[in-house]
Amino acid sequence: MKRWKHRLHEIIFEADTPAGKLFVIVLLITILLSVVFVALESVASIDAKYHTYLDWAEWIITVLFTLEYILRIVCVTRPWKYIFSFYGIIDLLSTFPKYLSFFLAGTHSLVALKALRLLRVFRILKLTKYIRESSVLVIALRTSRTKISVFIFGVLVLCIIFGTLMYLIEDNSSGFTSIPRSIYWCIVTLTTVGYGDIAPQTPIGQLVASLIMIMGYGIIAVPTGILTAEMSKQKPIDTNTQACPHCLTQSHKEGAIYCHHCAKPLNDVD
């Protein structure tokens, strides 16, 4: 990779250098401003008074994002790898709606897709501690997915049983007009949400509802305990924000020389 491309790659794709941190901070502020402008434009009174200014501001931001998108393509070894990557697709989706508004009416609101770019917040200011903890959480969720899936299936079975039971106990005037609607009530009650749109009226129904409410407090604690137990087994890996210029893989270990995915040098400069 040529030296100027390598330097540009460090600024745009990294957050470990002063220039990279500044770039990401400016980018994040621009994204927030863009989302604020789109939200303000949706308010009729504000749009009627400041529509021209908001439109110009959005065009300026769109041009900046377009330049950023082009620079990201230029500074990587394999442009198509970035274009079809997760963040590459988000970058494209957050840029083209404003241009699309030239041809199709009503597409301007799609500019709010720029909010998805806020996912990059985890690469700002080298928040190593939070990146490390998030990786532990992901691993814990992946490890405990079978236990949690079995637990959710068991809760679903209970909701079907109690929902059917409440359909038999209560009548239509209480809101239990069908088994699916009764199951919906059971799910709302078991999760302690309690919308109040359906409520049992008979003493037996109220007794069953009370049991479901008490059971809900115990059920909520189960997945939390499973996840906490798995997280306690995980050891965080010390990673940085460095991105491979060849395959765009991120989260390399501190001091790594080669990419852990494609095994190519992370600092490949001619």
Image (cartoon, rainbow, N blue to C red):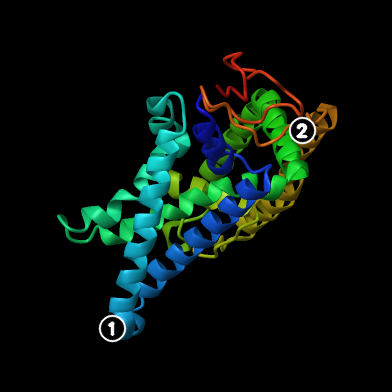
Answer above or below: position of 197 versus 113.
below
Identify which residue is drawn at 39% across, 58% down: 112
- Quadrant containing the C terminus in the rendered view: top right
Secondary structure at numbered mark 2: helix
* Residue at which label 1 appears: 48
Q: Measured from the top left, where is residue 124 in percent x and y?
A: 64, 49
Query: In which image quadrant can residue 58 be found?
Result: bottom left
Depth check, front residue: 209 or 189: 189
Taking the spot 74% from the left edge, 26% from the top edge, the residue there is 253
Q: Mark 2 points at which residue?
A: 226
Residue 120 percent across, percent down from the top left? 56, 46
The residue positioned 47% from the left and 49% from the top of the image is: 116
Q: In this view, does 101 lie to the left or right of 24?
A: left
Query: For this rendering, which residue is in front, 72 or 88?
Result: 72
Residue at the far left in the pictured view: 103
Q: What element carries label 1?
A: helix
Q: Name the image quarter holding residue 42.
A: bottom left
